[in-house]
Amino acid sequence: MSRIDPVFWLVQVERIGFLGRGDVDAVWALFVVWALAAALSAWSAAMFATGRLKP
């Protein structure tokens, strides 16, 4: 169940970066973090494009 939590993946990337090991594979953890960043960036861009957010 904890693997659904995005904070889990961020912590795993930190652990891999500092300790060199984590609970999951480094490539998989980085992929999930990059996918989350891309999804949130696209959502933010869509919010700005529709005028719901103003710069």
Image (cartoon, rainbow, N blue to C red):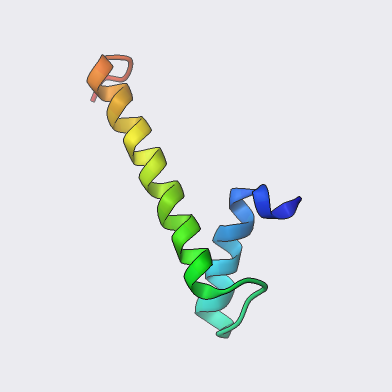
Q: Residue at x 55, y 59 (%)?
A: 10
Q: Quadrant of the C terminus?
A: top left
Residue closest to the eye, 20 or 18? 20
Q: What residue is rendered at 49% in x and 56% in y?
A: 32
Establish if 31 lies above or below 20: above
Outermost bottom residue: 20
The residue lying toward the viewer, choosing from 18 and 30, is 30
Residue 26 location (% of width, % of height): 52, 74
Please name the residue shown 62% across and 71% down the image: 24
> Which x, y percent locates residue 30?
46, 65
Name the residue furthest top: 51
Name the foreground residue: 27 vs 54. 27
Residue 50 x, y percent position in the rendering: 27, 16
State the image quarter where residue 42 is shown: top left
- Looking at the picture, does residue 15 appear above or below residue 30? below
Q: Which residue occupies 32% across, 23% down? A: 47
